[in-house]
Image (spheres, rainbow, N blue to C red):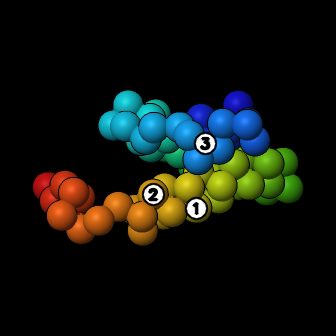
């Protein structure tokens, strides 16, 4: 299951740290690879579930980025 999934009772209480963000990025990498593989084999409809997880992860990351004050964001190398 996606690391972005947080049970209702824990929502808003989880601490976002670099390990969590790195795991999400790695998971997204794997999801994209899986989606591309399914699509290249002509099984585009079979990858919809992975697209939903990827979408959820991306929305979660965007929400974190939007909520992070600019002074605490690290510059991109």
Q: Judge whether residue 42 can be spotted in this image.
A: no
According to the image, label 3 marks what residue? 4
Q: Nearer the viewer, residue 64 or 76?
A: 64
According to the image, label 1 marks what residue? 59
Circle nearer the N terminus (1, 3): 3
Q: Is residue 75 above or below residue 38?
A: below
Quarter of the C terminus within the rendering: bottom left
* Residue 55 percent across, percent down from the top left: 65, 59
C-alpha distance separating marks 2 and 3: 11 Å
Circle 2 packing at 10 Å, graded few (<14), some (14-19), many (20+), is few
According to the image, label 2 marks what residue? 64
* Residue 62 percent across, percent down from the top left: 48, 63
Circle 1 packing at 10 Å, graded few (<14), some (14-19), many (20+), is few
Q: Judge whether residue 63 can be spotted in this image.
A: yes
Circle nearer the N terminus (2, 3): 3
Q: Nearer the viewer, residue 66 or 48?
A: 66
In the rendered image, which quarter is residue 75 located in? bottom left
C-alpha distance separating marks 2 and 1: 9 Å
């Amino acid at each position: 299951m996606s690391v972005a999934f947080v049970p209702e009772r824990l929502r808003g209480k989880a601490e976002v740290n670099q390990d969590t963000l790195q795991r999400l990025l790695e998971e997204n990498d794997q999801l994209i690879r899986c989606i591309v593989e399914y699509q290249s084999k002509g099984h585009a409809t079979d990858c919809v579930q992975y697209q939903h997880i990827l979408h959820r992860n991306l929305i979660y990351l965007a929400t974190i980025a939007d909520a992070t004050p600019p002074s605490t964001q690290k510059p991109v190398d």
